[in-house]
Image (spheres, rainbow, N blue to C red):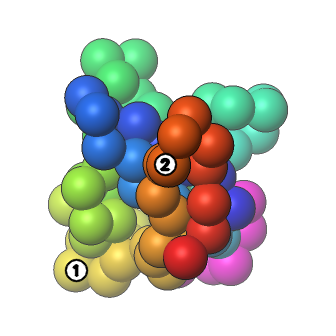
Amino acid sequence: MFVVRKSEKVFGYLNICPHYSLPLNHRADEFLTRQGDRIMCRQHLALFAIEDGRGLEGACEGRGLDVVPVSVRDGEMYIE
């Protein structure tokens, strides 16, 4: 799994592309576009919304990432 922080919020997802069940990243901690505004599958260049994991463009349009509920309490991250 991986976690993305956007402002004060955190969003967790399984690291599996819904198109072909491969990891989204090639390198450790590289899950976002260069602009940092979307999650990107490096295998297929599909784009996903950070806030809910829904597929926005590419091979996964209309499909989404599997959400892993996470939260931050007292500076520690927890899987819900």
Q: Residue at x 34, y 65 (%)?
A: 53
Q: Residue at x 40, y 18 (%)?
A: 34
The amino acid beneath tag 1 is Gly
Q: Position of residue 75 (x, y in %)?
A: 56, 35
Given residues 69 and 37, the one toward you in this image is 69
Q: Position of residue 58 (x, y in %)?
A: 32, 59
* Residue 40 is one of the magenta-drawn residues: no
Tell us which disc is closer to us: 1 or 2: 2
**The disc label shown at residue 11, or none:** none
The amino acid beneath tag 2 is Val
- Quarter of the rendering occupied by the N terminus: bottom right
**The disc label shown at residue 72, or none:** 2
Q: Going by the image, does 22 lie left or right of 13?
A: right
Q: Going by the image, does 12 lie left or right of 60?
A: right
Residue 39 in view in this figure: no
Q: Position of residue 9 (x, y in %)?
A: 30, 44
Residue holding disc 1: 62
Q: Residue furthest front?
A: 74
**Relative to 17, residue 50 above or below:** above
Range covered by the magenta-colored residues: 18-23
How many numbered tags mark residues here?
2
How far is mark 1 from mark 2, CA to CA? 29 Å
Q: Earlier in the sequence, mark 1 or mark 2?
A: 1
* Residue 22 is one of the magenta-drawn residues: yes
Check disc 1 and report its element: helix, strand or loop. Answer: loop
Q: Position of residue 24 (x, y in %)?
A: 63, 54
Q: Residue at x 50, y 49 (%)?
A: 73
